[in-house]
Amino acid sequence: MATPLSRRALSARPLPLQVPLETSPLKVNGRSISVSSKRARSPEPAGDHGLSTVKRPRAVPPSPVPATRQADDDRKDRERRRAAREAQKEEFRTKYTRAFPSWVFYIDLDPYDSESESASLRETLAARVTQLGGRVDDFFSREITHLITDQPVTSEDPTSNKENAHKSRALFSRSNTLLKSPIKLKGRLIQQALSLNMKIWSTAKLDNVLERCDVLAPTASSSRQPKSQGVPLPASNQRSLTRLLASERLHGTTTERDPTQKRHDYRYFSKSSCFVLVEDIRQELATIHALEYPLKRGRDGKDHGAWPVLYCHPKARGPFVEFDEKERRRWEKSQRADADKEEERMQKVARELSRKSQAQMNSRKAGDLRRSVSMNNLHRQAMHAGMDELVDLDADFGDAQDSAHASGYLASTGTGAYIAASGNSVGITSTTGTTSNAGNVFRTLDLPASLRGRIQQQVVTSRKVSSATAIKDQGSRKAGTMGPPVGIPERPNGLLRKSRSTNTLRLPKRDEGSKPGYCESCKIKFEDFDNHIRERKHRKFAMDDSNYLQLDFVLNRVQRRTREELEEQQRNWAVSHLYDRSSEAPETVLSTQSQDTALQDEDDVMWDDELDAEGEVDLEL
Amino acid sequence: MDSDDGLHIQGGVDSGEEDQEEEIDAQGDTDEEMTIYLKPPEEQHEIEQEIAALKLAVPQLAEDYTIVDRLGTGTFSSVYKAIDLWYHDKWDNSPWHGHHPSNSSAYYQSLPHVKESKVFVAIKRIYVTSNPERIRNEILIMEDCRGCRHAAQLITAFRHEDQVVAVMPYNRNEDFREFYRDLSMTGIKSYFRCMFRALRDIHARGIIHRDVKPANFLFDPRTGIGTLCDFGLASVKDVVNTQGAIQRMDTSTPAHGSCLHTSPSREYPHGRIRQRGEYDLEQIKKMQKEARQKSSWPSERVGYPDKDTRPHSKANRAGTRGFRAPEVLLKCSQQSGAIDVWSAGMIMLFFLTGKFPLLQSSDDVEALMEIAAIIGRQKMEKVAVVHGRTFATNVPSITHDGIAWRDFVERQNLRLMVPPKPDPRYYPSSATRSSSPPGPSHAPPTRESHAKDVEAALSLLAEIMQPESTRRITPRGALYHPFLADPSEPEDDELFPHPFGEGVCGKWHFVDEVTEEQCVYVHVNGEKKVRRLMAGEGTAIGGWPCEFHREEFDCDD
């Protein structure tokens, strides 16, 4: 978003950005030092005067002659021009500052070359880039937007030497895969960068841009200090006063910021939307939750959002369900179903009682009756379970996002790629894993409505596909593979197959033919459970006992003993008794107790900090 | 690991196939061996295939068990019903049976099966794509749960190549949706006594279940017995306590985003608010004020860092939607057993409102908003601060004060005060006819007794659904609450199975430093000898010593 903006800025800008290559880094540094005490962005005319005096002494020559009208006009004209220049400078600064966070730099300077200045130059440049929110990558990949190099730019195609050359990027799929190692690329780096439409800047140009964005090079002494580390510390870790001041200069605010000030690196909720924002009170952790509820204008002309509204209607299914006409019909239906069910049950009990007395009179085959009764009891339970399927409330609240999480196979991956994995109809399932997955937090914001719709669609499609494959795959499914159960298996011999009406053909409850997921042992995602566990890699893991050493240790301990083993243990124990008695000095219970008391003391110490807890803080702030 | 290892009977029968000839009796005993034949033929065949596959994958199963049916399938495992062929002759079953006294509700766990009877077990097949370490964690926790009341007991577990199976007692149970609207107050009390005893016992061992919900609490409404199962998501943290036994509670303080409350400790099982001076009160006040301002600003002025480089919260959020406590949703990094208590409270709400499920949100932030819609903005802001968070929202349905849980229940259930007709199928009415745990025969509830029960239940509910985890009632507290405490029964402390190394004879218990084996000193002829134990052995209960130290305390074994 910021990039096209900055491009416009570049083309509109008349100032020469390309600093001659011969400008040595040292010279750049030297110049920076001289101006570092000044604030270029100050809009006050007085400041402008001061700035230009320092920066361009010759531009404002001290006039020994008294001011004439001509000189006055000249001065006004100069001021006008200066004002225009300042405005341009300001525009440059704003636009570049905005663009930096979206840029990724690769600095083609040897970080380990301590002989020349290149290592320290690289370090300072990287630090300054980070300060502006840009990123410096240590690896040359397609992700890079700017190549910083002092190598001469040569190309067969001279037109592509322009940083704004418009070449279709679609030709190069900019996946994040790393290109070849930078060492191998030496020399070809620039060509690669050209072919990927990266911008190629010299170190001097980067320095210049940074300087004009008010990110000044540190003084020579401080730049040399953290020499040992090749990789520069991220700016956020540098809590020095210098950095804080620099950041203040940059953002016009301190980190003790004014919250009403809009920030370029922030994402804001849409106008007149409803939102929830949960943040770490110490600001140390990334945003905990941020959710925006899109507003929809209802028929009544009021805005409605998808946020929970507490109705607590006694006849609605849940507290957040509005009891409207639809819900009323549903309620009436369920009331009828309940009544029917109850009546049926009572009838059955009555019939059973009469049958029982009948059976008692007949008094033979009592056992058989008992059996048939019990079978029927289970039958009833099974039937009820089936009915519950029909009123599975979860179906109404189904959510693609959640089904992705519900899949145990995904455990911690949490990507949207295997959304259909769980396909379970039992509404409420567990998830595992931690909350390090950020993508999920902002889901409503991240996914435009159209995309969300598409994901829903994908779920449906993939379900269809997988149930289709379920039937196809059955033949190939071998006994001995321990996958989660697959769908309806076809009978191996057609003889047993009964003709089934369509409504008795039940789709599998929660299983699909191909079961994608994640194997925690092999640490890979798989497309199909059964295939994966037969793969060489997985078999190798399974056959290697060393992978199960610690588990076996525990399994060994919990193994049920046979009575024989117990008896043997007790015999051994009795023997060791005899042995102990002869070899060891008898220990007294007293000594154990004192030892235990010592342990007790330690324990007391351990809990001490908990025990002296008094004066709870009143959090009514 | 998953949820739906709930051993409820799956599958269904098309109503058209229903056999009108056969009649049922609510008390009919089921032939547990034949249950598979009640399922539709397609499912039967599928189950048979799976059973064959399981036998192949774990050859040592066939010798000792006959698998007869599938009990449930989940995302991380499947559970099968099997006959424990040599229960009576081959095995030493004492470690997992334990020694619960006859006046304990868990006595049935210690009661050996009747001679010659068929013994059924549940075999849990953990899918082979689970990491060995994750499986080890689950087995370790189950090992520690030996001796816990109303928690699934581990009989044995073994591995063949990548396939691990765990064997547990089979508990007959019914689907929650079948009985939650019909269970009497006595039945509900029985449900929660079992639930909180299970939670009290596992929490005392430093274990948080993390996935308490109806599907993981196998309840038989005919007997009133419930069993907490599926420790696949349960978590522990190691801290050494007295006697060197492993006590697991998270007392570590994370580097970032730590809460304003402490980690759980013995004194404060749900943590407590930190003392003044342990945090920057001024900063917190300032941030809270800022968050309140944000709630009132135009939305387009409220923002957050776009490309956040700060570390993300690593808090454990394992669990099931609709059952996660506010602190889980706020990504609290020092969670305690209080999260299980909240989930149990959600189940209590199902009983009291007669609705299930209640919360329908699909993700954490929406779940937080549902809770906020109930408890109100003020309480939610305060809860957030306790966990080191700020909560800002301009959603109009979030009121300042919210509503009380009592109102939440009463508004949704207009028949709350009407005593239900005794249901002959369910406890306690059923208890008079079938074998069941000790339970006094109850007269049908009167309007007065029912109203009293409802009052007590609502009062307990408010303490369970306390959004601030540090102020939420502990399982022990719940058991002593008037709703669950029964003056005619011994109090819970007397029946509490102590964690290993605690209780009156704790000083004679220790864990071998090298082998990590549990050991006891046994006194033989005035000499002290060391004896190694299996998990579950040597559990002191209430004021009583364990089975190895009865003589020292002059008890008759």
Image (tube, coloured by chain):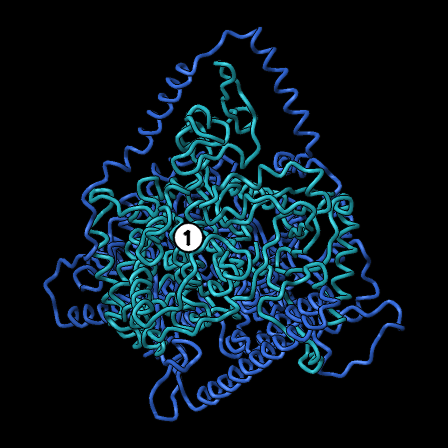
Q: Residue furthest left?
A: A66
Query: Is residue A337 shown left or right of residue B247?
Result: right
Instruction: Write down the colour of chain B.
Output: cyan
The quadrant of the picture occupied by the N terminus of chain A is: bottom left
Residue B542, visible in the rendered structure: yes
Q: Within the image, what quadrant is residue A70 found in? A: bottom left
**Label 1: element kind:** helix
- Looking at the picture, does residue B542 appear above or below residue A462? above
Horizontal and vertical percent for residue A357? 64, 74
Given the image, what chain letter belongs to the residue carrying mark 1? B
Query: Is residue A163 shown left or right of residue B367?
Result: right
Horizontal and vertical percent for residue A80? 23, 71
Residue at the spot 58% in from the left edge and 61% down from the top edge? B4
Query: Is residue B422 shown left or right of residue A361?
Result: left
Q: Which residue is mark 1?
A: B196
Instruction: Write down the colour of chain A.
Output: blue
Q: Within the image, what quadrant is residue B93 found in? A: top right
Horizontal and vertical percent for residue A87? 29, 69
Callout 1 environment at 10 Å: few (<14), some (14 to 19), or many (20+)? many
Count the marks: how many? 1
Q: Nearer the viewer, residue B359 or B87?
A: B87
Horizontal and vertical percent for residue A531? 76, 57
